[in-house]
Amino acid sequence: MIIAKYFWDLKEQALEEAGRILKNPKHPKFSQRMVTFLSRCDKPKELFSVIPKKKFVEVWPQVRTYW
């Protein structure tokens, strides 16, 4: 999944980092990047190609409190 269409404001190096961050819920910037991604992505299929459904459900409370 190419996340560049959701993070158009980031440079190439930051895009690579964002991809790694979205795969690691323990990263300090995870909630920030996930909120940005969720605010720009309206397709569940694309969301769950970035993060598995089960993991998303587990981290949703953390993301919601950041929102």
Image (cartoon, helix red, strand yellow):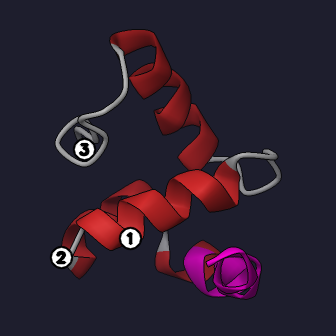
- The answer to whether residue 12 of the structure is visible from this angle is yes
Q: Answer few, some or many: residues within 10 Å of disc 2's Cα (few below 14, many 20 plus, some between 14 and 19).
A: few
Q: CA distance from mark 3 to mark 2?
A: 12 Å
Residue 62: x %, y % from top left: 76, 78
Residue at mark 3: 1
> Does residue 8 appear to the left or right of 63 in the view shown?
left
Q: Answer few, some or many: residues within 10 Å of disc 3's Cα (few below 14, many 20 plus, some between 14 and 19).
A: few
| Residue type at tag 3 | Met
- Residue at point 51%, 35% (across, down): 18
Question: Within the image, what quadrant is residue 46 found in?
Answer: bottom left
- Label 3 residue SS: loop
The answer to the question of whether label 3 and label 2 lie on touching residues, with beta carbons closer than 8 A, is no
Q: Answer few, some or many: residues within 10 Å of disc 1's Cα (few below 14, many 20 plus, some between 14 and 19).
A: some
- Residue at point 43%, 59% (across, down): 36
Question: Within the image, what quadrant is residue 3 found in?
Answer: top left
| Residue type at tag 1 | Leu
Q: Which residues are magenta?
A: 56-67
Tell me the mark number nearer the camera, choosing from 3 and 1.
1
Q: Which mark is residue 66?
A: none
- Residue at point 71%, 74% (across, down): 66
Residue 12: x %, y % from top left: 34, 13
